[in-house]
Amino acid sequence: MKDSYDLVIIGGGPAGLTAAIYAGRARMDALLIEMISPGGQMLTTDWIENYPGFPEGISGGELVMKMNEQMERFGVDVESAEVTTVDFSETSHRITLEDRSISCRTMIIATGASPNKLKVPGEDTFYGKGVSTCATCDAAFYRDKVVAAVGGGDTAVQEALFLTKFVEKVYLIHRRDELRATKILQERALANDKIELVWDSVLTEIGGSGMTVEQVTVKNVKTGATRSLAVDGCFVWVGTKPNARFLNNSLKTDDWGFIWTDQHMQTSVPGVYAVGDVRTTPLRQVVTAVGDAAIAVHAAEEYLQSET
Ligand SMILES: Cc1cc2nc3c(=O)[nH]c(=O)nc-3n(C[C@H](O)[C@H](O)[C@H](O)COP(=O)(O)OP(=O)(O)OC[C@H]3O[C@@H](n4cnc5c(N)ncnc54)[C@H](O)[C@@H]3O)c2cc1C
């Protein structure tokens, strides 16, 4: 195993896989490090219908397989490990894994984001046992049952629609009186008779007995009235937080901890780039993640050339 590379890509979601494809084609001396398995959030996505080239849409799992195959063609080294810390104090950057460290001249951070929690009573108690953030993974457990879902953005509405293939009913709880999701998704949700919108409301508690969710409490933010909904499970889609803890505040970020970059994806440290969901960006999607990655590899190549 080598302990020094020109480029190390951290994270193997769509951004990291694309960076590896571009780096491989450019014959760069590159390594991709992924701590779980390649694919990132696409692995938990049922159906992607806004990624160009697939007119009927494509399952998240299949798109992962295709990107992975494409990456393998170009021969970039891949290592399965978690990056625990990084050190930018020397000209050559240092990356620490559980059992070894690696140095690199340039780095692309593609570690993505993870779902936010609601932070309400019962959420931790029932997490993974009735509370979920992944319909693709868990919808089948709720066949012909009633579930609550929280959120109003693209992911929430898309996932609620997916749930309707299995469940009897979804209460979609949203804090405002209109959804934030794109119009086409809004129209589908409003037309779906398995989805009941619970407008102007927040979920305040998840309750049940033993290992089973039995009800959620919702509060109307306009009237203050609370009510209990009998449900068998609860899905939460209320935004994401960046997977950037291993950076230990060593890069400039926005107020929410997403990494700041310039238009070349360069962070506040020269030769270090951030791409995809982990960076400050107006849109977090597969198509934007892969675009970021192409720009970052191009910038890293230019940086390496300027150094030699
Ligand atoms: C339910 C759901 C549905 C979605 N539907 C769509 C859709 O229809 N269309 C669309 O375009 N987008 C969709 N998205 C959004 C899309 O999946 C993300 O925008 C995209 O995956 C971001 O890619 P990324 O590579 O930046 O990050 P991620 O996909 O989050 O990948 C990051 C990777 O980095 C790895 N990692 C993290 N930390 C470390 C570390 N310290 N060391 C090593 N590896 C690490 C993770 O294991 C992960 O594999 C959806 C997301 C969700 C959750």
Image: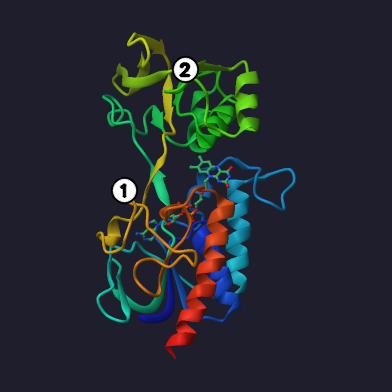
Q: Can residue 2 be seen from the camera position used here?
A: no
Q: Percent x, y for residue 298?
A: 54, 74
**In the image, what residue occupies the spot 49% across and 29% down?**
152
Question: Looking at the picture, does residue 102 appear above or below residue 97?
Answer: below
Question: Looking at the picture, does residue 33 appear above or below residue 284?
Answer: below
Question: Looking at the picture, does residue 40 appear above or below residue 93?
Answer: above
Q: Can residue 149 be seen from the camera position used here?
A: yes
Mark 1 CB lies closer than 8 A to ligand 1: no
Q: Percent x, y for residue 184?
A: 65, 31
Give whichever of 118, 39 is nearer the camera: 118
Disc 2 marks a residue whose amino acid type is Trp
- Residue assigned mark 1: 255
Per the rendering, the mark at residue 308 is none
Q: Is residue 300 left or right of residue 207?
A: right
Indicate which disc, 2 or 1, sits on the residue closer to the N terminus.
Answer: 2
**In the image, what residue occupies the spot 37% across and 74% down?**
270
Q: How many marks?
A: 2
Give whichever of 154, 60 is nearer the camera: 154
